[in-house]
């Protein structure tokens, strides 16, 4: 729970020595409460202050690091709703293979996982993990497959089996990869905890209800083991949605530490649409790792897009660098378009210009990552600001045309733009980027 400035002040020496850069201990305490200072700036902080403030600053959902270099982060969340602040570590997406699948299918899925890459609004999106489930009886073949999955994809593995010995053998085989063992029930808890701890892996725990799950995680926490994932047992979409929400609310609002861990969910079933809906629900409501039953590019595009939208910081619009972008291979007499530096707008407009079959120059002034109408309403995308950017960018000497195509939504700035950019003519383009192709055909070809 966050401490107030006054509560923090009681833990400080109260000598007002100023060595931390603040005039008083109270002023420093206020900065600590606002997370604008660090306790290490006070050389006289007591051990009690360090331990109390350290615990208070821990996120209510434990941060778990996965993968050989620990770069896949799960949890660490501090808010229930994205708009309160931001979600910090997106749901990891994994694809499942079974040891009973044919070698050809296994080979093909592993290569697809390794090679999958989707570029969206300037970000490269890929599959985070591979899950290997034991359905057959050959423990050695299962362990070999787990190793192969890691070797081919270089992704951390979620190792799933009902057989404790197989899980422990696979845990040893993947020592150092910081993978996940799934899943520990009460009777296997101690053995799997020991194996996970010894080999540096995380452990998913599962139980029929939240009370039983809390009992298991409490046992692990008491033993000092904290690399935990929660695997809820639910029936149907409504219960899945409800359980994810109850657990996250309990961790964030009621400080129920035994539920303050990321979750692991397997999407099972043969219907692709049902699977997508279940996965969307999991991603939207706090999923830690979501394991998909098959490699399906259409499903992945949907889920990656939703995940990206949810996990961008609502206070920081994703934006591209303000500059002149060549689209295709423009020449000095190619058309000049202008739009804002909101990533989504930039990528849609540049993509539509490309689709229209021409090369062009795209002028992208600084608009603080706002879309066209928002930037215009905020005074960041006016005739004067665009003209200033055009003059400073040097494009006037690089092109022979003096036509500049502005988005149809800001047709009203054309006069102001021409006034501030002598010699240029503002051409009003389409309102929607989707109409650029027909605009090009009608006016530019
Ligand atoms: Fe107080 Fe520590 Fe700052 Fe000195 S350095 S004013 S003791 S908080």
Image (cartoon, rainbow, N blue to C red):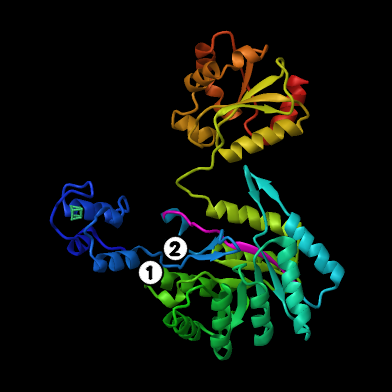
Which quarter of the figure has residue 51?
Answer: bottom left
Residue 192 x %, y %: 58, 83
Q: Nearer the viewer, residue 332 or 144?
A: 144
Residue 260 x %, y %: 45, 72
Q: Nearer the viewer, residue 80 or 264?
A: 264
Which quarter of the figure has residue 101?
Answer: bottom right
Which quarter of the figure has residue 221?
Answer: bottom left
Tell me, yes or no, whether the two marked residues, 2 and 1, touch with CB atoms within 8 Å: yes
Residue drawn at x 49%, y 18% as measured from the top left: 388
Say left or right for 41 vs 272: left
In reply to whether residue 110 is colored magenta, the answer given is no
Where does label 1 land, which residue?
253
Note whether residue 167 is visible: yes
In the image as oriented, which residue stretches furthest toward the left? 15
Q: CA distance from mark 2 to mark 1?
A: 9 Å
Pointer 2: residues within 10 angstroms few (<14), some, or many (20+)?
Answer: some
Residue 80, numbered label:
2
Residue 408, numbered label:
none
Residue 375 x %, y %: 49, 32
* Range covered by the magenta-colored residues: 85-98
Please tell me in which quarter of the rendered image ligand 1 is found. bottom left
Say left or right for 35 vs 297: left
Q: Quadrant of the N terminus?
A: bottom left
Ligand 1 closer than 8 Å to label 1 CB: no
Say left or right for 40 vs 186: left
């Amino acid at each position: 729970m966050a401490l107030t400035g006054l509560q923090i002040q009681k833990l400080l020496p109260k000598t007002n020595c100023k060595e931390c850069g603040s005039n008083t201990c109270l002023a420093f305490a206020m900065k600590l409460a606002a997370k604008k200072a660090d306790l290490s700036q006070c050389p006289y902080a007591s051990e009690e202050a360090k331990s109390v403030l350290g615990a208070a600053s821990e996120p209510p959902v434990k941060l778990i690091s996965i993968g050989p270099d620990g770069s896949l982060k799960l949890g660490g969340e501090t808010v229930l709703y994205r708009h309160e602040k931001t979600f910090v570590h997106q749901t990891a997406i994994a694809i499942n293979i079974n040891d009973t699948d044919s070698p050809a299918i296994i080979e093909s899925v592993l290569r697809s996982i390794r090679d999958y890459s989707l570029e969206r609004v300037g970000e490269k999106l890929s599959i985070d993990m591979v899950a290997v489930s034991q359905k057959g009886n050959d423990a050695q073949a299962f362990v070999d497959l787990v190793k192969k999955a890691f070797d081919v994809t270089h992704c951390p593995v979620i190792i799933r089996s009902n057989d404790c010995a197989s899980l422990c053998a696979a845990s040893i085989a993947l020592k150092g990869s910081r993978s996940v063992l799934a899943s520990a029930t009460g009777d296997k808890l101690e053995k799997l905890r020991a194996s996970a701890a010894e080999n540096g892996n995380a452990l998913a725990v599962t139980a029929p209800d939240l009370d039983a799950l809390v009992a298991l995680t409490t046992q692990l926490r008491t033993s000092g083991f904290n690399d935990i994932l929660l695997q809820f047992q639910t029936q149907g979409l409504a219960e899945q949605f409800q359980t994810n929400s109850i657990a996250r609310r309990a961790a964030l609002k009621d400080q129920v530490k035994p539920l303050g861990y990321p979750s692991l969910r397997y999407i099972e079933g043969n219907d692709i649409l049902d699977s997508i809906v279940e996965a969307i629900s999991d991603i939207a409501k706090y999923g830690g790792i979501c394991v998909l039953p098959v490699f399906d590019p259409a499903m992945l595009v949907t889920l990656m897009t939703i995940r990206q939208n949810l996990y961008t910081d609502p206070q920081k619009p994703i934006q591209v660098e303000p500059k002149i972008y060549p689209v295709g291979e423009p020449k000095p007499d190619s058309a000049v378009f202008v739009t804002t530096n909101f990533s989504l707008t930039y990528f849609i407009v540049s993509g539509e210009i490309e689709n229209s079959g021409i090369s062009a120059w795209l002028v992208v002034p600084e608009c603080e990552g706002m879309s066209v109408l928002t930037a215009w309403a905020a005074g960041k995308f006016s005739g004067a600001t665009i003209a200033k950017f055009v003059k400073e960018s040097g494009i006037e000497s690089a092109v022979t045309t003096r036509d500049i195509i502005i988005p149809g939504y800001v047709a009203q700035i054309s006069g102001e733009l021409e006034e501030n950019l002598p010699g240029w003519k503002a051409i009003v383009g389409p309102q929607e980027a989707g109409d650029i192709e027909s605009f090009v055909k009608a006016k530019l070809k």
